[in-house]
Amino acid sequence: MADPSSYRPKPGEIPDSPGVYRFRDEHRRVIYVGKAKSLRQRLANYFQDLAGLHPRTRSMVTTAASVEWTVVSTEVEALQLEYSWIKEYDPRFNVKYRDDKSYPYLAVTMNEEYPRVQVMRGHKKKGVRYFGPYAHAWAIRDTVDLLLRVFPVRTCSAGVFKNAARTGRPCLLGYIGKCSAPCVDRVSAEEHRELADEFCDFMTGRTNTYIRRLEKQMAEAADEMEYERAARLRDDIGALKKAMEKNAVVLADATDADLIAVAEDELEAAVQIFHVRGGRVRGQRGWVTDKVEEITTGALVEHALQQLYGEETGDAVPKEVLVPALPDPVEPVQEWLAGRRGSGVSLRIPQRGDKKALMETVQRNAQQALVLHKTKRASDLTTRSRALEEIADALDLDSAPLRIECYDISHLQGDDVVASMVVFEDGLVRKSEYRRFQIKGFAGQDDVRSMHEVITRRFRRYLAEKEKTGEWTDGENTATPEIDGNGEIVGTGLTEDDGRPRKFAYPPQLVVVDGGAPQVAAARRAMDELGIDDIAVCGLAKRLEEVWLPGDDDPVVLPRTSEGLYLLQRVRDEAHRFAISYQRAKRSKRFRSSPLDDVPGLGDTRKQALLKHFGSLKKLRSATIDQICEVPGIGRKTAETIAVALARSAPAAPAVNTATGEIMEEEPGTMGSSGEPVTTGAPDERRGQET
C-alpha cells in the first residue's frame, strides 16, 4: 500500500487549467482517468487526510504510485480525451458500466450490394443501420416476419445467396413472397435497395406514409374489381399495424428521444435507457456499475452519455436526451453531443406531462434492475469469496489468490504439442489475459518437460517486464524486446510510459497445473531456477480430483462439496478446453499443408495460379521447369525451386484401393485449399486421445 504523500506533486507544479489526469500503479498501469475544469483544485482533493476520503477513493490513491496530467484548451476537449483514455487503458477504478446482457439489434447491412436484414449483437459496424436494442432476439424475428410481407428484403446468409444464384432457384422465402429474390434477378440491385430503404424508413417511425399508400392501393384494386390483390394489400396493412402495435405510442408528439434514469446506493448504480423513436419505444437497455468514488448523479449521467454516444454519430444521437440530473457543467456535454450528432441536442430534465410520466417508468425499471443485480451479485460474491478462502486455507496461503493462472499441455500422440495459460481474477475468467504456447524445446511426448518449458518461458517474460519497468534494476534500463523461436515476443515493446496492459507483466498469486506430482514438481523447479519463490504452485489431477503440492508425498483432498474444489475444477477445465482448441487448429492446419508451402516467397495467389493452370498437384509434379515458367508470375528461379520442393515431397508409391486393387488417380475437383487431394474417412494414424 502506497502513501499518497510519496508521489504528491509539489506546490505550484499543477496548473490551474482544464485537463485530464491519470493515476498509475507501481507497474505503470493506468488505474484511474479523470477530467477537471481546474486540475489544481481537483487533484488537491485526492491528497487530503485519508480518513476523509470515500473508501474506494482511498483504495485508489493508496494503490497508485504516481499521477500525471495533460492540459487541454477547453472542457469539451477534456471530455473527449477522458473518453478516449478510458477506452484505451480500461482503468480498474473508473466508473465502467457493465451491460446486464448482450443486447440484440435489428440490423440492415446497407454497406452490401444487396442489403440484408438480420439480428446482430456486439460492436456496431460501419455502413450498417441498427434498430433497437431489443430485449430478446425472438422479438426481432417476429417483427421482421410481419414486415417481410410488405418489404420483401433479403434475409439469407451470403452462402445461401450465392448458392441460389448459382442454381437459379431461390430459397423458400422467395417462393412464398417474403423475399424479392434478387439472387435470381427477380428484382435489380437498385430496386432491392429501394425496398431496404423503405424498410428502414418504416423502422425509424415513418409508418403512416406506407399505411396510407397501401390503403389507397387497396381501394384502387377494389374499384377495379381486382379483389385478390385488394385482399393481399389488406393483409399487408394488417401486418404493418400488428408490427406497430408491438411498440405502443408513449409520446403523442412523435418525438425522437432517449430517456436515461439512474438508481443508486452508496456502492453501486444502475442505469436504464429507453430509446423512443417516432413516439414509440424502439429499444431498451440497462447497465450497472460500481461507484469507485464519491460521485453525484449528474456525474453518473455524464459517464452514461459517454458510453452511450461515444461511438455514435448522426441520427444515432437523438435531438432530445432526457435525464434525471444534469452534469455539472452541462454546456461542454451538450456541445460534445451536438458534435457527435452534427446538429443541436437538447439535454434536459423533464418537468411535466407525458415525458415526465415516461421518465418515472424508466426510473422504476432502473430501481428494479439495481435490486435484481444486488441479489445476484450478493450470491456470486459470497460464493466466489468462500471458494478463494477455502483454496487459501487448503494450500496454506497468506491471502486469498485473487489472480490464478492455470496451465495445460495438449498433443496428439506426441505431435503438435501445445500449451495453454488461462487466467481467473477474483474467481472470474479474464479472457484477455489468456495465452497459448508451442512446445519447441524438444520433440515427442513428455508432459513434464513441456510443463517445465512453458512455466520457464512465462515467468522469464515476467522477469523481463520487471526489468523493463525498472522494478528491480539499479542502473539504466537497457532491456529490449526479444523474440523466441516460435515468433513470440519476450516482452511487449510497450514503452515505460504506456499504461496499457502488458503481456505476462503481472504475477499470479497461485499457479495451477493440470496434472499430479510430476507436473507440479516441474513447475516448481522452473520457478526456482528463475529465483521466484513468492508464487504458490499446485496441481489438480483428473482421476480423483486431488490437489498436489510441491514436495508433498500425499495430496490435499478437498471435500466434493467444496466451493474451492469447484473453482479449481473450472479453472482446470477451461485450461483444458483452450489447449485442445489450439491443438486442433494446429492439427487441421498441418493436414491442409502442401509441398508448395515450403517454397520461399511463394504466396497464396501464385499457389492458386499454379494449381489452376495444371489442374492438380500430380500434374504439377510431372511438369517441366519450362512448363512451370508458363504460369504468369513464375520466373525460372522460382520454377526451379518449386520443382525441387515437389521432387522431395513426391510419394513413394501410388495410392491403391485395397478393395479393388485399382490405382487411385487424383481428380482436379477433389483438391483441398492447399492443393492436396481431400481424403474421406479418418486414417488410423490420425486418431488418438487428445490430452
Image (spheres, rainbow, N blue to C red):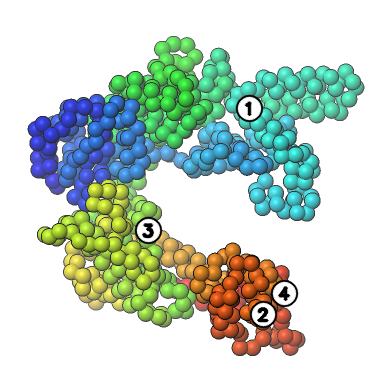
Q: CA distance from mark 4 to mark 3?
A: 43 Å
Question: Looking at the image, which residue is at 39% across and 54% down?
Answer: 431
The residue to which callout 2 is attached is 623
Residue farthest right in this picture: 225
Q: CA distance from mark 3 to mark 1?
A: 44 Å
Q: CA distance from mark 2 to mark 1?
A: 60 Å
Q: Amino acid at mark 4?
A: Glu
Badge 2 or badge 1: first in the primary sequence: 1
Disc 2 residue crowd, few under 14, some 14–19, many 20+, Cα 10 Å: some
The residue to which callout 3 is attached is 434
Q: Viewer-nearest of labels 3 and 2?
A: 2
Q: Is residue 332 visible?
A: yes
Badge 4 or badge 3: first in the primary sequence: 3
Q: Amino acid at mark 3?
A: Tyr
- Asked if marks 2 and 4 touch (Cβ < 8 Å), the reply is no
Instruction: Describe the element under mark 3 as helix, strand or loop.
Output: loop
Q: Viewer-nearest of labels 2 and 1?
A: 2
Residue 608, percent from left and from top: 62, 66
Instruction: Describe the element under mark 1 as helix, strand or loop.
Output: helix
> Relative to the observer, which residue lies in front, 181 or 293?
181
Instruction: Describe the element under mark 2 as helix, strand or loop.
Output: loop
